[in-house]
Image (cartoon, grey):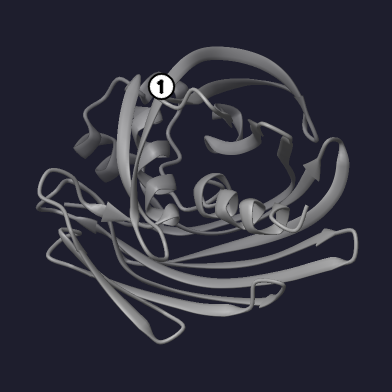
Amino acid sequence: MRLLPIITFSLVSIFSSIVNANANTLAAPSSIDKPVTQLLSNKNNQCNKTLRYKVFFEGHHIGDYERNLVWDGTHANIYTNSTVNILITKAKLNQHSKLHWSQQRQSFVTDSFERNIKGLMTGKVSATFTDNGAQSTVTENGKTHKFSETLLPILDGDTIGAQMRLDIMQGKKNFNFILQNSDDTSHYYFKVVGEETIATNFGDLKAIRVDQIKKSDRQLSLWFAPSIDYQLVRATYKRKLLDLKAVLISKQIHCSQPIILK
């Protein structure tokens, strides 16, 4: 049971980061077949967003997280605050990530992130990404690791969320990413399963379901609602004795003047 907060925070790096780290593309559902450059240039808005989620373990509320996304031109700052309570164990996570739109890659790439955890898993992790994601340097509690990739950029969870949401809006059915962990990198594969109507805090909504694939020992599923800015409204994770669920409970989206990504 002591491992549950660790696993929960690992999931925060994957599916909670998908919550609001996105292209802020407020496109109508009919626009998802348009080229990515047209989606970004015509429908992109400089929006600040705050989304709040609850996390459940086997139906029991064990934690909350709040994420704030602030855009500055084609760059974004993402702030995450999360708390997990398991029996007598309590842990808090604070993270600040930076990402931007890469004209060279025609995708989002990570600039850096800083993560601070207090409680059972007390520690600090910081990372910087260079060469449009081809190189990364991670420092965890004073120890530094360097990584490199040639085919895909190395991304943090926030940037994976940004790119996945944009891929879904573009109508793609399969996508894969290299996720930067604190001391390693992992290759994740996803597939759009289809559209489902699910019960949410905002009523019954049509949502696009995305499943993680090529992992037979676990099941990670994500539901994105086109009617709510293509935001993540539900996420579930099942593995051995684990049964975790995250649900969107509130949202605030404020948009100012449109920005153009070239």
Residue 126 location in percent, x, y? Answer: 40, 77
* Frontmost residue, 99 versus 226: 99
- Please give the name of the residue rendered at 38% of the width and 47% of the height, measured from the top-left corner: 160
Count of marks, rendered view: 1
* Frontmost residue, 226 versus 153: 153
Query: Label 1: how many residues lie within 10 Å, few (<14), some (14-19) or many (20+)?
Result: some
Residue 192 visible? The answer is yes
Q: Is residue 223 left or right of residue 175?
A: right
Residue wearing tag 1: 191
| Vertical side of 213 occupied by 121: above or below | below
Q: Is residue 167 left or right of residue 36?
A: right
Badge 1 marks a residue whose secondary structure is strand
Residue 195 location in percent, x, y? Answer: 55, 13
Residue 23 visible? The answer is no
Given the image, on which type of amino acid does mark 1 rest? Lys
Residue 10 location in percent, x, y? Answer: 56, 54
Residue 31 location in percent, x, y? Answer: 36, 24
| Vertical side of 72 occupied by 230: above or below | above
- Please give the name of the residue rendered at 56% of the width and 29% of the height, measured from the top-left corner: 218
- Please give the name of the residue rendered at 72% of the width and 39% of the height, measured from the top-left corner: 244
Q: Is residue 86 left or right of residue 117?
A: right
